[in-house]
Amino acid sequence: MLPSSSSTPSPNGVLFVASDVDPVHELDYNRWYDREHVLERVSIPGFISGTRYQAIDATKRYLGLYHTESLAVFRSPAYRQAFEQQTPWSVENLDRMREPMRRVCQVLAHTGAGQGSVLLLVQLPLGSTQAQLEKQVLTLGAQLAEVDGFVHSCLYLPDEALSTPLPQESTQGRVLQPILLVHASTLAGAQQLRALALHDLVVGDDAASLYGLVWQLHAVDL
């Protein structure tokens, strides 16, 4: 049985980074992520995990999610040092990112628990309050939980002050939209969840992305 839907009293944080990279640099880009960057970030006190995804149906090929104990971790001296004093390999590959999207978010309004092999992201319209968004995502989560393959849904709510853009990220017209995140155990389930979510939220197909799990590192494993 799935855990009851609830809003997290003390929300965790997450660093969300989606990007493309020129194919000529793709091998080194993935080596950097796999051999240095994820380990470096997850080693920072307060980080819980780092997870890499690759696009199934998305405009940006790669997605990295780094979960933390709270948003306060992104204000800590250890994180500021890592963010402001990048390694030469990091500087090189951060500059290679094409049209990256960096967001630091609160993680709210959970339904279910766990992580699936397929990830659905839906960018939500602006204009609602935090309370309205949480209620909307919880209500939708209860519907999604009835679909075979559903694992977990939640709300990513960007923090404007902490969502500093990456070097190659355009700041012109930059909009920090809330994101519905849904984990599914199968692609077929994720596609059904996507159709249901888009219909309920009354948003277009271009608001949704599907990603497949590549690998994950937990701080407790270090």
Image (tube, rainbow, N blue to C red):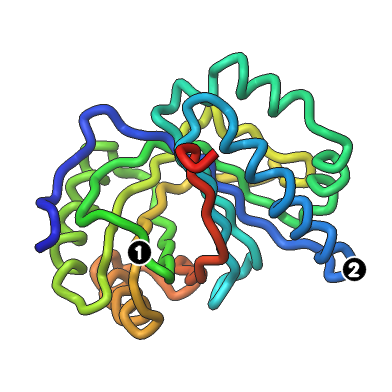
Viewer-proximal residue, 216 or 178?
A: 216
| Quarter of the image that includes the N terminus | bottom left
User: Which amino acid lies under the numbered mark 1 shown in the image of this protein?
Assistant: His
SS of the residue under disc 1:
strand
Residue found 25% across the figure and 54% down from its top:
113
Residue found 79% across the figure and 45% down from its top:
94
Upstream in sequence: badge 1 or badge 2: 2
SS of the residue under disc 2:
helix
**In the figure, 20 relative to 13: above or below?**
below
Residue found 56% across the figure and 71% down from its top:
58
Any mark on residue 165, and which?
none
Q: Position of residue 97 (x, y in %)?
A: 77, 53
Any mark on residue 24, and which?
2
Q: Where is residue 79 in the image (x, y as percent from the top left)?
A: 61, 24
Q: Position of residue 12 (x, y in %)?
A: 36, 34
Q: Position of residue 118 (x, y in %)?
A: 43, 71
For label 1, the residue is 183
| Quarter of the image that includes the C terminus | top right
**Residue at far top of view:** 77
Left-right relation of 211 to 156: right
User: Which amino acid lies under the numbered mark 2 shown in the image of this protein?
Assistant: Val
